[in-house]
Image: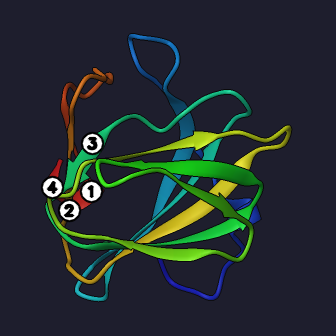
Amino acid sequence: MDGPFNILDLDLAENVAESGDAAYRGAYIANGDEGTAQYFVIPPGKRLGKHHNSAEETQLVLAGTGRVILDAGDREVRAGDVFVIRQGEPHDIENTGAEDLRAIGFFAVDRVEHYWTDEVWPGGKVTKSPNLQ
């Protein structure tokens, strides 16, 4: 997608896992030679779903509060927080607040795959950036 653009103007895809407790709305805002970035919104009381990625991810929390769930221990996050998830590190993000948790995940690669531990999405247990579909 050519920029600049406003993420609030994006058409977000609704994603709900078969389990029902993992749900998010999201869109890829870059994928290709410039890297990959995914904007996502987790509703109150929901979580993203436990998974690991094929590349290191840097996340920026734009709004809301939540908890990043890692094997090494949980971390509380809020708007303005930035954190790095290592390639292959299992993680989940839960919205613990009363408003949507909004974040962007940045990957310094042109393609990324997400391997879900428990969740099954419409695309299955492996989801991919659009240029891998």
Q: Secondary structure at mark 4?
A: helix
Give x and y (percent) for residue 121.
32, 24
Q: Which structural element holds mark 1?
A: loop
Camera-nearest residue between 62 and 30: 62
Mark 3 or mark 4: which comes first in sequence? 3
Q: Nearer the viewer, mark 1 or mark 3?
A: 3
Q: Earlier in the sequence, mark 1 or mark 2?
A: 2
Camera-nearest label, 3 or 4 = 3
Q: Give the alpha-carbon distance from disc 4 to disc 2, as whole Å.
A: 8 Å
Mark 2 burial class by Cα count in 10 Å: few <14, some 14-19, many 20+: many
Could you tell me the amino acid type at mark 1? Ser
Amino acid found under the numbered disc labelled 4: Leu
Residue 13 seen from this side: no
Whether label 4 touches label 2, CB < 8 Å: yes
Dot 3 falls on a residue whose secondary structure is strand
Q: Quadrant of residue 108?
A: bottom left
- Tell me if label 1 and label 3 are in contact, CB under 8 Å: no
Please give the residue where the numbered disc 2 appears in the rendered image. Answer: 112
- Which of the marked residues, 3 or 2, is nearer the chain's N terminus? 3
